């Protein structure tokens, strides 16, 4: 037994030594490879910039440089939009890269699928969109996340429903789904509007939040409807969204929410009224600031300060005035 | 007779070390898998986009400060400059006797305001609250001294956002630290209760205005040993536990928490020196009893740099304090031990800590003399001694070196090859005395804890009516 | 070499400020091809210093830069007599209502969201400079 343990330990230690040596060598080779890559990049950057600009690349890109060149284009691709993106997509289509990666999207190795999904986003070819939407059902979370991100990069309006569905079913993390939708931009709003009929309150809440970020005042109607949702989270998100899109016609409906049973919703309504409210709601806001629970009272005081700064300053100088009003008034003074 | 006893003890010592290091080896593999998966996910995490994203939740960074006049302004400046879309900085001046408040007042043009403070958590009296004319995201709370836990709770009362990031005054955060430590929260806001980042040693690095601008090894041997030790503790230890859903420790120097949950467990506790450990254990306790799904994650890339002690006395004192904190926290939540209600955490993780962190050091310190005595009296063979050393030292070296290897594979912050080679040497040296010294200090801490318990028992019996052990 | 595309005054100088080197490269290439002169800054402090020293005809700045944000630099430019008239285009990854109005409040003339089209940026530069 003792000998067995000893030999185990010695073998492991030996392996450890070997591993350490391997890592050392790896570090050296990596450094050299990195240097070579940087040199290649420096050489190719002008050609990449020319391509982005619509000029004929001066000189052909050689075999071994193609990888670096593609990576370079991918990197620039993340920064640009519009006609430059189209030129990048053209390059990748022309050289068959898009087909290659579409093929790898069906690989048996999950990391290959994920890398392919990621690359397709960088390449900017909208031909990849249907295949990517399919891949949202992949069994690996990394692959799904890469797919969602790429769909966002490609501005895939058709994918909106699947992405929100992915979030609602827990297949996509909130940040990934949200970011994808934000990247798709305001064209996603149409698909999001439909989702306020979804069964799952989490999906409804998510869709409403994103409408607030991507939509505009013309979406007021669907958001006001959601103010009466059964889920408190949906109501709160709807209130916040109305503030964000600047829905000035919804002031009274938002004011109704100041009486909501859930403090979260009252606070969100108050915050929204700071943006779209008017003098009619000030009195109620001041009342909330004096009597309500912390979060709601604070939001109400801030909103009142926004809508009627002089009134709040007067109220706070009265004896025994509420702490939240005092704070709001002091901040008004300070940052006037 | 004695020989038989010695033989038994020696075998026990061997078995103990084999178990200890064997378990740690398993951890290393778990941590390695965690790190590779994390690295892959980083590509799609799109940190830049998260930074720009309006979906990112707000964070209140709470900084308790006691007698920090020297570095407080730089600290606060660098916290205000963190890359994060929605954060505020709440500095709590815990009754400093020096110019801490004055320095802040001058540097940030502070103006007193009447601020609404939550009253969920009781703290020492607040003397005043200030806002800055030049920095909208800064709040300074001035209060009477109450200790670090008390100051943190006060900061929580003054925070406006959903999440609190507790930082130490001497911790230096990297620019992206906040957004990276918030990553688990972004992915699953309902689920993540807390997350912690990695702490690295700043000794030897070039610091400019509260930011680390060049990473280099410390000059002193003691600090170098700690660098290697931190790799093992963080990259392997915390990553491993986090993957097993049983992370008990989120560093007090840099940790992110859901504010409401912290309120629910009563905030940071003043009754222990390890208030950071106690909070995390309390969160586990509370959430498991509620039967809710939750996660407490370790994120390996957001970095926080701190200075480590470079002399033995300071180091010993720090380690003993940590150990006492761990013990006090585990004792306070002792109902979790071996309790199936707490799942893997209660059945495996906590007993592991008790056995290998408290009882274990006894064996770790006595093991060597026992085996030596056993050999000298002929109770065990030379081969046995060889085996013992292999288990105790050789495996230990393997673990330290593999922790270094994990760092090499993942982050490689020490870019100079010479530094890596030096670390390799220290990884070996770590097991030739440093680890054993640490075990000795842990033992001392344990003895102190027992004696304290005894003291308090004695005092209560004598009717002195004292409430609780001092922090 | 670089072909000048239009008849903008060849001496028009543009300040490009962004901590991302790739963005600076993209912009320099596009703007130089259009016949403008380009100076680069890597952070807010450098941007301010270069603006004060060279008095460019226009500044294109990222909002989120180290040391000083695009908003701050714009504000400071507006405060100084010698740089008050320099038109500013802000670039940002964030384009919420609040951010856009904050940009205009600080004194910016235009606001472009990232990812952006260098061609479009160049058109806006031309429009602003053409008005002068």
Image (cartoon, coloured by chain):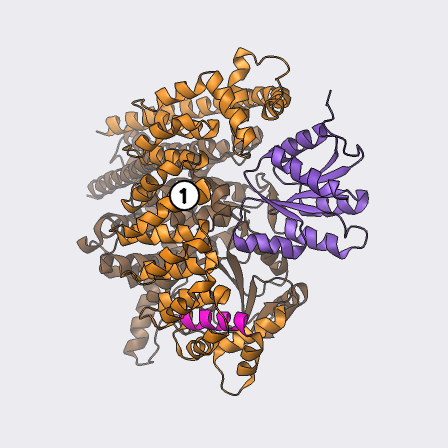
Chain colours: A orange, B brown, C purple
Quadrant holding the N terminus of chain A: top left
**In the drawing, does residue C79 fall left or right of residue A138?**
right
Q: Position of residue B240 (x, y in %)?
A: 34, 41
Q: Is residue B354 visible?
A: no
Q: Chain of mark 1?
A: A
Q: Residue at x 40, y 26 (%)?
A: A127
Q: Position of residue B209 (x, y in %)?
A: 64, 51
B394 or A301: nearer the eye?
A301
Is A328 within the magenta?
Answer: no
- Give the main secondary structure, helix, strand or loop, of the magenta stretch: helix
Is A305 within the magenta?
Answer: yes
Above or below residue A122? Residue C108 is below
A10 or C46: nearer the eye?
C46
Above or below residue B111? Residue A35 is above
Q: Residue at x 25, y 60 (%)?
A: B334
| Part of the protein shown in magenta | A296-308
Q: Is residue B120 visible?
A: yes
Q: Position of residue B190 (x, y in %)?
A: 33, 54
| Badge 1 density bin: few <14, some 14–19, many ≥20, Cα 10 Å | many
Circle 1 residue: A188
């Amino acid at each position: 037994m003792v000998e067995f343990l000893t030999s185990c330990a010695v073998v492991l230690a030996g392996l450890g030594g070997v591993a350490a040596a391997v890592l050392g060598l790896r570090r050296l080779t990596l450094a050299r490879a990195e240097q070579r890559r940087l040199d290649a990049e420096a050489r190719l950057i002008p050609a990449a910039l020319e391509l982005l600009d619509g000029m004929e690349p001066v000189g052909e890109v050689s075999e071994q440089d193609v990888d670096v060149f593609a990576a370079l284009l991918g990197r620039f691709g993340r920064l640009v939009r519009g006609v430059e993106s189209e030129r990048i997509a053209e390059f990748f289509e022309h050289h068959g890269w898009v087909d290659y990666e579409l093929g790898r999207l069906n690989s048996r190795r999950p990391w290959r699928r994920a890398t392919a999904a990621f690359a397709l986003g960088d390449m900017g070819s909208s031909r990849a969109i249907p295949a990517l939407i399919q891949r949202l059902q992949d069994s690996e979370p990394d692959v799904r996340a890469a797919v969602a991100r790429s769909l966002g990069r490609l501005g895939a309006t058709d994918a909106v429903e699947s992405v929100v569905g992915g979030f609602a079913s827990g297949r996509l993390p909130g940040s990934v789904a949200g970011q994808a939708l934000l990247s798709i931009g305001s064209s996603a709003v149409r698909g999001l509007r439909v989702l306020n009929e979804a069964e799952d309150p989490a999906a409804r809440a998510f869709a409403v939040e994103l409408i607030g970020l991507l939509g505009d005042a013309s979406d007021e109607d669907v958001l006001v409807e959601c103010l009466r949702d059964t889920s408190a989270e949906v109501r709160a998100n709807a209130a916040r969204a109305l503030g964000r899109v600047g829905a000035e016609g919804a002031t009274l409906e938002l004011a109704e929410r100041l009486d909501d049973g859930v403090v979260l919703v009252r606070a969100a309504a108050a915050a929204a009224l700071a943006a779209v409210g008017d003098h009619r709601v000030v009195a109620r806001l001041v009342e909330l600031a004096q009597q309500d629970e912390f979060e709601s009272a604070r939001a109400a005081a801030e909103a009142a300060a926004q809508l009627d700064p002089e009134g709040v300053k007067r109220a706070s100088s009265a004896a025994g005035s509420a702490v939240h009003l005092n704070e709001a008034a002091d901040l008004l003074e300070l940052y006037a | 007779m004695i020989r038989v006893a010695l033989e038994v003890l020696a075998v026990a010592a061997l078995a103990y070390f084999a178990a200890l290091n064997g378990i740690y080896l398993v951890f290393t593999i778990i941590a390695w898998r965690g790190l590779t998966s994390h690295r892959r996910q980083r590509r799609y995490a799109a940190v830049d986009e998260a930074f720009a994203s309006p979906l990112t939740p707000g964070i209140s960074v709470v900084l308790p400060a006691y007698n920090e006049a020297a570095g407080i302004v730089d600290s606060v400046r660098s916290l205000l400059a963190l890359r994060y879309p929605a954060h505020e900085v709440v500095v709590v001046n815990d009754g400093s006797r020096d110019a801490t408040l004055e320095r802040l007042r001058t540097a940030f043009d502070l103006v007193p305001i009447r601020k609404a403070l939550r009253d969920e958590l009781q703290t020492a009296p607040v003397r005043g609250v200030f806002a800055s004319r030049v920095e909208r995201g800064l709040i300074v709370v001035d209060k009477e001294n109450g200790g670090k836990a008390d100051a943190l709770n006060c900061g929580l009362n003054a925070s406006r956002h959903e999440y609190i990031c507790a930082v130490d005054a001497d911790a230096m955060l990297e620019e992206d630290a906040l957004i990276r430590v918030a990553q688990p929260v972004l992915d699953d806001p309902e689920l993540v209760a807390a997350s912690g980042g990695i702490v690295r040693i700043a000794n030897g690095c070039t610091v400019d205005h509260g930011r680390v601008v060049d990473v280099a090894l410390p000059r002193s041997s003691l600090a170098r040993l700690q660098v290697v030790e931190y790799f093992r503790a963080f990259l392997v230890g915390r990553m491993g536990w986090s993957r097993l859903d049983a992370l008990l420790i989120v560093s007090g120097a840099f940790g992110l928490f859901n504010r409401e949950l912290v309120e629910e467990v009563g905030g940071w506790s003043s009754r222990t020196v390890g208030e950071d450990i106690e909070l995390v254990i309390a969160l586990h306790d509370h959430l498991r009893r509620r039967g809710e799904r939750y996660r407490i994650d370790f994120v390996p890339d957001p970095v926080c740099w701190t200075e480590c002690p470079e002399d033995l006395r300071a180091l010993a004192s720090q380690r003993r304090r940590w150990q006492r904190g761990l013990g006090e926290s585990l004792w306070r939540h002792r109902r979790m031990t071996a309790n199936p209600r707490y799942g893997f955490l209660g059945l495996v993780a906590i007993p592991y800590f008790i056995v290998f962190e408290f009882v274990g050091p006894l064996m770790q310190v006595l093991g060597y003399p026992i085996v030596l005595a056993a050999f000298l009296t002929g109770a065990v063979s030379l081969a046995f001694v060889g085996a013992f050393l292999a288990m105790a030292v050789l495996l230990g070296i393997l673990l330290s070196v593999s922790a270094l290897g994990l760092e090499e594979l993942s982050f490689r912050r020490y870019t100079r090859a010479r530094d890596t080679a030096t670390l390799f040497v220290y990884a070996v040296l770590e097991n030739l005395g440093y680890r054993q010294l640490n075990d000795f200090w842990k033992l001392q801490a344990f003895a102190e804890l027992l004696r304290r318990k005894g003291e308090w028992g004695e005092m209560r019996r004598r009717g002195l009516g004292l409430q609780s052990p001092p922090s | 070499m670089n072909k000048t595309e239009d008849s903008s005054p060849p001496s028009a100088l543009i300040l490009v400020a962004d901590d991302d080197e790739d963005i600076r490269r993209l912009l320099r290439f596009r703007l130089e091809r259009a016949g403008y002169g380009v100076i680069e800054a890597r952070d807010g402090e450098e941007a301010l210093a270069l603006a004060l020293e060279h008095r460019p005809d226009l500044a294109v700045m990222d909002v989120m830069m180290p040391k000083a944000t695009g908003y701050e630099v714009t504000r400071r430019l507006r405060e100084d007599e010698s740089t008050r008239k320099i038109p500013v285009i802000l670039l940002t990854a964030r384009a919420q209502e609040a951010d856009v109005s904050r940009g205009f409040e600080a004194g910016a003339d235009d606001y472009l969201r990232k990812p952006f089209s260098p061609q479009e940026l160049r058109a806006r530069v031309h429009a602003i400079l053409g008005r002068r």
